[in-house]
Amino acid sequence: MAANKTIKIHNRSDKPDNIILQEHEVASDCSKVEEQLPRFMKGYFAYLRGNVLPMTRLSYLRDVKFFCQYLIDQTGLTGATTIKDIELDDFRRIKASDVNRFIDYCRQYEVEKDNEIIVYENTNKTLARKKSSLSVLFKQLYRDELLEKNITDGFDPIRVQKASEREIKALQDDEVMIMLDAVSTGTHLTPKEHQYWEKTKKRDKAILILFLTYGLRLFELQQLNVSSFNFNRGEFKIYRKRAKEAVMPLNESVTDVVKDYIENERMPEEKVREGHEDALFLSLQGRRLTERQIRDLVKKYTSIGLATSRKAGFSPHKLRATAATSLIGRGNSIYDVQALLDHEQVTTTQLYAGHKMGIKRDLVKDMEWELERKGKK
């Protein structure tokens, strides 16, 4: 019955209601997973609440739930038929080698659903997170004196690419201009895309400009409200990781596109769905745009800039990288860029400083070889 109840926010803080609601939803999802896990993990639940970000906490809990289901379905380590019934003695029998086999199982596994078999494949980055979820669990059970041994030292290492080893993907300036021309004029869109563009072009342009100017994270942009903006003071407010509040200055181009969208295209408030009245970016149905909708929108326009398929377009995080490389490429201090993008470590920002747009292309261009071409006299 509780699932049918309407959630109302009684907010006495400075945070907008949508931020409070989002935090509540994540905490509620965590509680639902915890209710399905064995009671002896309560110390682990408390540790996660106080030490990791809410979304990380949710991911860890889901990893542990998946591990428990694996124990039931794939091993003889427990006689339980439900996750909740797994006993502490079952966990006392688990060895490091059992966890290593689980991580190896997670590389690729099958799930049968209705009339189809779904094959799941995980990257080393995902496997490393699953290993971390279980490492924290087993260490906490050991600290709580529920396990006699700390088996985590026997967990196999997982090779994950360092940030410095990854190729930084970002749009070049000419690709950015092609993308912005597409959102401004509707060029390179399919007939169906053009129909939607006629109704959302100002919204889409404002979204792209905000991403490119500030390097916002997807959730930071998705949670923006009309009330987030104070045009008289030339600033707007965002909420970052751990719900940290940050005030961002507005420049002329951002002010122009956001005001143009609000005043000339955004749905009138009386037509907006209940609970979404303050949301800045709305769907045609009058609801706050979801993260998925924004991601699809960005992939569409970046694919035009890249001259590739819609599927191969860039994610919003690549626009964050574009903002970083563009700012540093224009001579801005990496420490100033670090502050703008909210990087915890300046070493993250330095990766963008080491990335020179088009450097490989320029090097190869200077190494042309005169070859005799067919038909050339």
Image: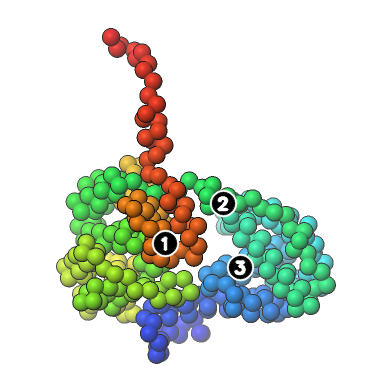
Observer-side mark, 1 or 2, equals 1
Task: Tell me the kind of residue under disc 3.
Answer: Tyr
| Residue identifier under label 3 | 60
Mark 1 and mark 2: span between their CA atoms?
21 Å
Observer-side mark, 3 or 1, equals 1
Picture residue at 67% right of the left edge, 76% below the top? 44
Q: Given the current orientation, which residue lies at the most extreme top position?
A: 377
**139 lies above or below 321:** below
Q: Decide which of tag 3 and tag 2 comes sooner along the chain.
A: 3
Residue 289: which numbered mark, if any? none
Task: Tell me the kind of residue under disc 1.
Answer: Tyr
Picture residue at 30% right of the left edge, 11% below the top? 375
Task: Tell me the kind of residue under disc 2.
Answer: Lys
| Residue identifier under label 1 | 335
Q: Decide which of tag 3 and tag 1 comes sooner along the chain.
A: 3
Horizontal arrangement in the rendering, residue 91 relative to residue 35 (left or right): right
Residue 85 point in image, percent of width and height? 73, 75
The quadrant of the picture occupied by the C terminus is top left
Front-most of 273 and 95? Answer: 95
Mark 3 and mark 1: span between their CA atoms?
32 Å
| Residue identifier under label 2 | 162
Front-most of 149 and 45? Answer: 149
**165 lies above or below 367:** below
Residue 117 point in image, percent of width and height? 59, 52
**32 lies above or below 205:** below
Mark 3 and mark 2: span between their CA atoms?
22 Å
Observer-side mark, 3 or 2, equals 2
Residue 80 in view in this figure: yes
